[in-house]
Image (cartoon, grey):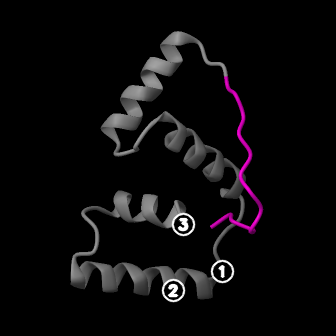
Amino acid sequence: MVSSGIMNKQINLRLPEQMLITAQKYAKTNGYGNVQEFIKETVREKIFEEKALSDKEMDLVKKLIQASDKKSLYGTEKELIRKLRSK
């Protein structure tokens, strides 16, 4: 979704211990592979939350959801959204 052919950069992030523990629990409970994936998705949400989908884009998303439902391509809507955002 965000890829522009440029190599990813690594950053270091310091969190209070309790925040890290809570983030780890949240990541595990909500199907993230690790805290880094959770944080990356959270940053994406903040960056793109103001960008509303056009009507055409929303129609495509609805068609994708319908096709996915028919073929059982995902377990839950949340999993589908997570998969869409990770691409």
Q: Is residue 72 above or below residue 37?
A: below
Q: Earlier in the sequence, mark 2 or mark 3?
A: 2
The picture places residue 23, in percent across and down from the top left corner, at 47, 27
| Residue that mark 2 sits on | 60
Name which residue type carries label 2. Answer: Leu
- Horizontal side, residue 80 vs residue 10: left or right: left
Q: Secondary structure at mark 3?
A: loop
Q: Specify whether residue 4 is painted magenta.
A: yes
Label 1 or label 2, whichever comes before in sequence order:
1
Q: Earlier in the sequence, mark 1 or mark 3?
A: 1
Seen at 44% across and 63% down, the residue is 83
- Contact check, label 1 and label 2, Cβ < 8 Å: no
Quadrant where the N terminus sits is bottom right
Q: Which residue is mark 3?
A: 87
Q: Residue 54: which disc? A: 1
Work out how far the residue at label 2 is from the one at label 3, CA to CA, in angstroms.
Answer: 16 Å
In three-dimensional space, the C-alpha distance between marks 1 and 2, rounded to whole angstroms, equals 10 Å
Q: Is residue 65 left or right of residue 46?
A: left
Q: Is 6 left or right of 57, judged from the image as shown?
A: right
Q: Is residue 37 above or below residue 1?
A: above
Numbered range of the magenta stretch:
1-13
Helix, strand or loop status at disc 1: loop
